[in-house]
Amino acid sequence: MTVQKKSQTQFPWLKSYPNDIPWDSKISEGLVHDLMEEAATKFGQSSCIDFMGKKYTYIQTNDLVSRVAKGLQNMGLKKGMKVGLFMPNAPHYIFFYFGVLRAGGTVVNYSPLYAGREIASQIEDSETDFMVTLDLALLYDKLLPLLSETRLKKLIICPLAGALPFPKNYLFPIFKAKDVAKITWDDHHVSFTQLVDNDGDPRKIDIDLHEDIALLQYTGGTTGIPKGAMLTHANVYANVCQAQLWFDPIKPSGEKILAALPLFHVFAMTAVMTLAVRTGSEMVMMFPRYDTLEAMKLIQKHQITFFPAVPTIYNMIASHSKVSEFDLSSLKACLSGGAALPADVKRRFETLTGCKLIEAYGLSETSPAATSNPLMGISKENSIGLPFPGTTVRIMSREDQTHEVPLGEKGEICIQGPQVMKGYWKRPDETAHVLHNGLFHTGDVGYMDEEGYTFLVDRIKDLIITNGYNVYPRVVEEAINLHPSVQEVTVIGIQDKRKGEVPKAFVKLHEGAALTEEDLREFLRDKVSPLEIPVHVEFRAELPKTIIGKLSKKELVAEEAAKAKDTGEA
């Protein structure tokens, strides 16, 4: 057997790999904050950020990053201390993300949608000492009580008006006065202006690429208490280098990336922020949250070329009543992640825009990207694609985790690569459960075909066991999505006295569409097995979504559990 054939047997994806991307590339290593310094040297006067019309060049952004780093050190930040970022997309997020790292600290991301209890819990678990936020009442009012209730020592307050262009910077405090926080300045509060009033020359900190943590990224917590994935500098730096190799058509200093996803989410961190900085691209920021009409306006106005998002966002654009009024032809590539991309959504979006929409896959624990369909080459529907450069994917038996299943058979998706986390913060047992035998065990069920493409079947935790048989919600969702009246669907398992669990579908219809439970079941009869046809169907005007806009099962599972308890079926 030749070496090439042996390799293709061991690494099936080699036969499908893009010709100009070597899978066994040596992935670069570096400090994450050096990405910004390198960009300032290479792309100095190019625009780094466009925030509601105000632009920051790479030189200006890097200068503010350095001033933030020096200010944090002057404030007492020591190597390894944790700094929380609690804000929607704004220029300050980028200044502090790279500034904290340059100062020697660790970034801890917080969702602005968190309730006070959730924020307090994460502060204590992560050991966050400083928190950065905007001077918006919606954010500040959640944090203020935590100065006395948690270990939090200081709040760093960034003025939103200062990031706006003229005349918005003057008008915002006047016309949005009720939205601006009323702050009593004391020793626990530090203003952004005060923090960056320095020479921008921070002390150089000795950082170990492979040991020192750049980012504590907390998982969603749908299976219990959220866990902080420890992502080292080597992990995060490697993943953006892998992404740059994969998306080779992205031209240095020539792209405009729409930051529709929140940067505090790990998907946007790499697919938008660090990839933009690595390639000298411009980030056009949406604020304060995603809006479909605004997204289409921005794509047309700014001639956006790269648009990473989640499937629901592409679905909302493809289904929007005014989509035909906009020119979206500037888009060169769109990257879907965070959830399964329905084939129908992919086709409709590509037809409307002429842009290639590819599905990728990743997790907080993999910084996050692990696999993707290629931009140039075959993009298989319902597949999460090929392993990223330097990444190995194995499908392991769920019964014997040392045994790799044959191609085409379902098992647990396991990953090996430089982007895989160091472990879970302060959780050695849970770390040992997912990191062993040289692989990260994702908890996702999938299979690999003969050409090395991986197909995600479902999360192990979402598996529905009915009458002893496995039902995968994703399979049912894909079938329901084929119905022309269906815009969105989520399937979960609910308790059943006779069968243990049965599938229940929550469906949102397209505007003006009509569908009955019985009509939907009849539609599914030749598409899924009898066990997979939902026993219950509930039509809703809206379905719950996460902060990045992907459909969320957590709220529906909690609702159904509460109902079962009330009726005595729990």
Image (cartoon, rainbow, N blue to C red):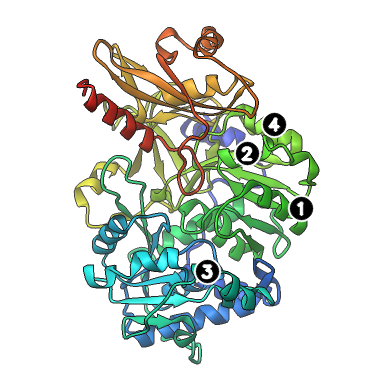
Separation (CA) of disc 2 from disc 1: 16 Å
Q: Which of marks 3 and 2 is nearer the N terminus?
A: 3
Query: Residue at label 1?
Result: 300
Image quadrant of residue 569? top left
Q: How far apart are marks 1 and 4 (CA)?
A: 19 Å
Q: In this view, does 181 lie to the left or right of 430?
A: right
At label 4, the amino acid type is Arg
Task: Tell me the residue that label 2 is attached to.
Answer: 316
Q: Name the residue under label 4.
A: 348
Q: In this view, does 345 lie above or below 105?
A: above
Q: What residue type is labelled 3?
A: Ile
Residue under the image location 45 percent in, 9 percent down: 529
Q: Do residues under tags 1 and 3 come within 8 Å of each other at their CB atoms?
A: no
Instruction: Indicate the amino acid at tag 1.
Output: Gln
Q: Do the residues labelled 3 and 2 touch (CB within 8 Å)?
A: no
Q: How many labels does the image show?
A: 4
Residue that appears at 62% across and 79% down? 60
Viewer-side residue, 469 vs 530: 530
Mark 3 Cα shell of 10 Å, populated few (<14), some (14-19), many (≥20): many
Residue 113 position in % (x across, y down): 42, 54
Residue located beneath label 3 in the image: 94
Dot 2 alpha-carbon crowd within 10 angstroms: few under 14, some 14 to 19, many 20 or more:
some
State the residue at coordinates (43%, 53%). 418
Q: Nearer the viewer, mark 3 or mark 2?
A: 2
Q: In the rendering, at what x and y percent does residue 114 appear?
A: 37, 55
Q: Pinpoint residue 254: horizontal percent, then vertical percent.
A: 73, 62
